[in-house]
Amino acid sequence: MSGLLVIMGSGETAPTMVKPHRAILERVGERRAVLLDTPYGFQSNAEDISARAVGYFAASVGRQIEVLSWRRPPTDTLERERALTTLREAGWVFAGPGSPTYALRQWRDTPVPDLIAGRLRDGGVVCFASAAALTLGSHAIPVYEIYKAGVEPHWVPGLDVVSPLLGFPAVIIPHYDNAEGGHHDTRFCYLGEGRLTAMEAELPDETRILGVDEHTAVLFDLAAGTASVLGNGRFTVRRGGQSAVHPAGSVVSIATLASGRAAAVPLAAGPPLDETVAEAPPESSLKAAADALEARFDIALAARDADGCVAAILDLEQVMVDWAADTNISDEGEHARAVLRSMVVRLGELAQRGARDPREVLGPYVALLLDLRAKARTGRDFATSDQIREGLAAAGVEVRDTPAGPEWSL
């Protein structure tokens, strides 16, 4: 029996991946679900990242998971064997953000890579995202070294777990559609087209680059021989600069991936998933969600719709809670808080001015005065008529006499 290999481009602990995680974990049943903490094991806040991930799966996904700590190969024999036994028994193994080269150093020349592959041979699920996903191919990108430290672009040897499973040599690139650089090209896991093209030329000719967009998951069902694309983005198979692109909702045969063709089979042919996975996913970032809700708030505010304003504020507060467990640290939380504070202040200003349309509030009073003015004019009491008109003008109400009768505006 063959298992399920899941590659996530990013968002592994974001609201966007909740439904895919739920569907994937249904396949695991009662088998142990473990989080392998190696990729971020060098960070001083590693404990916090683990705790947030555990909280995310418990609160959002509805599954209790345990942390398998392998930040460095354990030197204590008992500790080492306990960790390896946990990995051997796991039905679901998850790893995510951090440094791919750090993870490779801690896993290489240990039983970990073989045990990861063994989970797939035994019908288990291996779910690797972001940095961890980079390690699974024949070659890996040293992202931090190239993008942050300015090291010349180069490959490092990967674990090469996917090549024997898929039947062709492959390199995994998450964050494939990254756009953080704005006008600076940060696609392809921060490489950009120029560096990727140069590095691709160094790969063996038969190697495929498997690119997974952010907030997107590709499920390789090894028994069915299919790859299903879920989430917000696309799955790209690239070879020699030519790409076959498979959008969310596609299911493509693994044999087709080897050929490089962009043919796909209907979604129903893929692995059994909860049908709700195909629904439109949430916004792909906390910032995007906050900006969308601010736009909704702006519309409600312009319409003096107090209930709509309050609803947008409450929805933003809930979105911030939903994203709180995301292990990808960024300044988007501060952005969302700033938007929330601004919305509260602007709602307060609306309350001071009065949310109701002034015409709606003043209308009955103006109508009464205009009626009195009309009666005065009918009785040729022009002094009273003028007094009423001047009084209204002083209050900011302009009266215009038309053939159809008097009209007024503020």
Image (spheres, grey):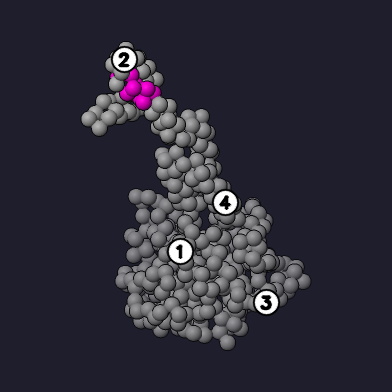
How far separated are the C-alphas under marks 1 and 2? 68 Å
By secondary structure, the bulk of the magenta-drawn segment is best described as helix
Residue 81's label in the rendered image is none
Residue 136: give x, y in percent of width and height: 51, 72
How far separated are the C-alphas under marks 1 and 4? 18 Å
Q: Which residue is mark 2?
A: 381
Q: Which residues are magenta?
A: 369-377
Quadrant of the frame with the C terminus:
top left
- Residue depth check, mark 3 versus mark 1: number of the one nearer the observer: 1
How far separated are the C-alphas under marks 3 and 4? 32 Å
- Residue depth check, mark 3 versus mark 2: number of the one nearer the observer: 2
Q: Residues within 10 Å of mark 2 (few under 14, many from 20)?
A: few
How many marks do you count on the picture? Answer: 4
Q: Which residue is mark 1?
A: 280
How far separated are the C-alphas under marks 3 and 1? 30 Å
> Residue at 47% across / 67% down in the picture?
279
How far separated are the C-alphas under marks 2 and 4? 62 Å
Q: Above or below — where is 310 with respect to 145?
A: above
Amino acid found under the numbered disc labelled 4 = Gln
Nearer-N-terminus badge (3/2): 3
Q: Which residue is mark 3?
A: 31
Q: Which residue is mark 4?
A: 318
Nearer-N-terminus badge (2/4): 4
355 relative position to 62: left or right = left
Q: Residues within 10 Å of mark 4 (few under 14, many from 20)?
A: few
Nearer-N-terminus badge (1/4): 1
